[in-house]
Image (cartoon, rainbow, N blue to C red):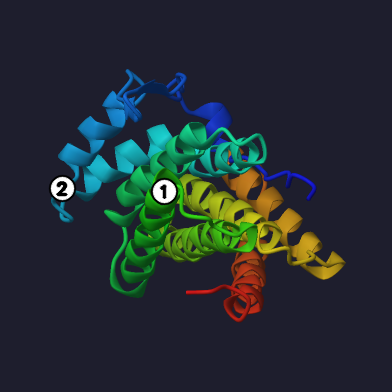
Amino acid sequence: MKTKEIKMSVRNMIAVLVPITAAVVLLGCKAKTKADEPIAVAEEQVKSPSDSSVADEIWYFFNGDVQKNLQLARNTFTSKDYDSMIYGIEKAAAIMKLEAQRASGQNKIDLDNSIKKMENLANDVRAKVFVPVPEYEQAFGNAQYVLGKFHLDKAKEMWKKKDYFTTGEELNEASLNLENAHLWIGHEVDSTSMKALDQSQKVALDLMKDVKWVPDNVVNAFESLSTEVGKLKGQIVT
């Protein structure tokens, strides 16, 4: 099976990211590395769902790592490097937990459920339980689908607050996550969807760079991505 090329977040390029060190295996268990420490600290800091300001700062720091770690897990499955696969899945799940601290209502429920699926998948790989390729790709697709929905709702929320830079960040994340969700589940991204996703990313970057942007284009991007959510809804196993 051809390895999927999953798009990375723009914030992965503009944020200061924690270097990912190699997994260390000792007596069959992966020891924690310095790359794990910020996540452990972040999870400790955002234990309270009300601590949204801390969660927002942590999200800025780690955003983009979900896609990167899911791709790592996919690539290392192909090479049968199961320790690194577990590492990628668990790192992605840990970052999603931070995202869930900013969520509420159905978005939080969906994120929590997706995180549980990821943790169960990592445990299955660790226990050497056979996991068919479609099963873990559905889990990855589900993760990026619920992240896409969440970021889209956050973009709309920030738009109402006239926080245009953050609107752009959230809109860009929504677009990239929804596109990746299509790819994980083997769903062909047709020309209409690709045009909508690309235009949404352009609008997002215009907002982030504070160059000339048109309010109608932002609203159209919201509508286009809502359509993509609808297309994916029937394809994602929840």
**Residue 100 drawn at (x, y percent):** 32, 56
Judging by the rendered image, the residue that carries numbered circle 2 is: 47
**Residue 81 drawn at (x, y percent):** 56, 32
Left-right relation of 90 to 233? left
Q: Nearer the viewer, residue 18 or 227?
A: 18
| Quadrant position of residue 217 | bottom right
Q: Nearer the viewer, residue 173 or 19?
A: 19
Tell me if mark 2 has few (under 14), some (14-19) or many (20+) residues whose alpha carbon lies within 10 angstroms of its own.
few
What's the amino acid at mark 1? Ala
| Residue at the right extreme of this rendering | 191
Task: Say whether disc 1 or disc 2 marks the residue closer to the N-terminus.
Answer: 2
Left-right relation of 74 to 69? right
**Residue 151 drawn at (x, y percent):** 47, 58
**Residue 220 drawn at (x, y percent):** 66, 69
Residue at image point 55% right, 41% down? 73
Q: Is residue 8 above or below residue 21?
A: below
Residue at image point 40% right, 61% down? 117
Q: Is residue 139 above or below residue 230?
A: above
| Secondary structure beneath label 1 | helix
Left-right relation of 62 to 100? right
Residue at image point 60% right, 60% down? 132
Tell me if mark 1 has few (under 14), some (14-19) or many (20+) residues whose alpha carbon lies within 10 angstroms of its own.
many
Whole-number angstrom distance, CA of label 1 to CA of label 2: 22 Å
Judging by the rendered image, the residue that carries numbered circle 1 is: 122
Q: Point out the frontmost of discs 1 and 2.
A: 1
